[in-house]
Image (spheres, helix red, strand yellow):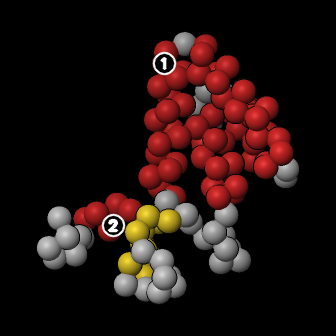
């Protein structure tokens, strides 16, 4: 379990290498991961985007277009996006931090 501040508890965003929590970086990474299975070039463009906060609508549009292509593409996008979220969100408690899967596998006694 990695360190967390005392005021953090529950599900939280991952930290960058510099120790900050960035919702913009998280969102960009999730959108890119969602597009990887069906539009790798668009996913790469998302990862390369340096002005995500102002330019994300064009990338969301590409995701919607890719998902609208067919039902299988939409399912692949949803599954990849959800997997990225589940794999990167963190769970903070007792001054430490772990993956959500690890936290759910070891609930506090009396918590569930």
Packing grade of label 2 (10 A; few <14, some 14-19, many >=20) is: few
**Residue 102, relative to residue 95: is it above or below?**
above
Image quadrant in which the C terminus is located = bottom left
**Residue 92, relative to residue 45: is it above or below?**
below
Residue annotated with mark 2:
102
Where is residue 100 shown, x and y percent of the image?
Answer: 38, 62
Outermost residue on the left side: it is: 110
Tell me if label 1 and label 2 are in contact, CB under 8 Å.
Answer: no
Image quadrant in which the N terminus is located = bottom left
Where is residue 36 shown, x and y percent of the image?
Answer: 62, 36
Packing grade of label 1 (10 A; few <14, some 14-19, many >=20) is: few
Element on which disc 2 rests: helix
Distance in Å between CA atoms under marks 1 and 2: 30 Å
Going by the image, does 79 lie left or right of 59? left
Where is residue 19 shown, x and y percent of the image?
Answer: 65, 78
Residue annotated with mark 1:
72
* 79 or 7, nearer to the observer: 7
Q: Which residue is depicted at the point 44% across and 52% down?
A: 86
Choose top left, top right, bottom left or bottom right for residue 39. top right
**Residue 34, relative to residue 13: is it above or below?**
above
Q: Which residue is depicted at the point 72% across and 26% down?
A: 62
* 62 or 10, nearer to the observer: 10
Going by the image, does 61 lie left or right of 96? right
Q: Earlier in the sequence, mark 1 or mark 2?
A: 1
Outermost residue on the top side: it is: 70
Q: Which residue is depicted at the point 66% across and 42% down?
A: 32
Element on which disc 1 rests: helix
Where is residue 75 shown, x and y percent of the image?
Answer: 47, 25
């Amino acid at each position: 379990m990695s360190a967390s501040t005392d005021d953090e508890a529950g599900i939280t965003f991952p930290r960058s290498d510099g120790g900050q929590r960035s919702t913009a970086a998280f969102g960009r990474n999730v959108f890119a991961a969602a597009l990887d299975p069906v539009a790798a070039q668009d996913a790469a463009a998302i990862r390369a985007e340096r002005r995500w906060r102002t330019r994300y609508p064009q990338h969301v549009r590409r995701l919607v277009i890719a998902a609208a292509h067919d039902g299988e593409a939409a399912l692949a996008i949803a599954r990849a996006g959800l997997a990225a979220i589940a794999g990167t969100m963190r769970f903070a408690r007792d001054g430490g931090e772990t993956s959500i899967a690890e936290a759910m596998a070891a609930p506090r006694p009396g918590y569930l």
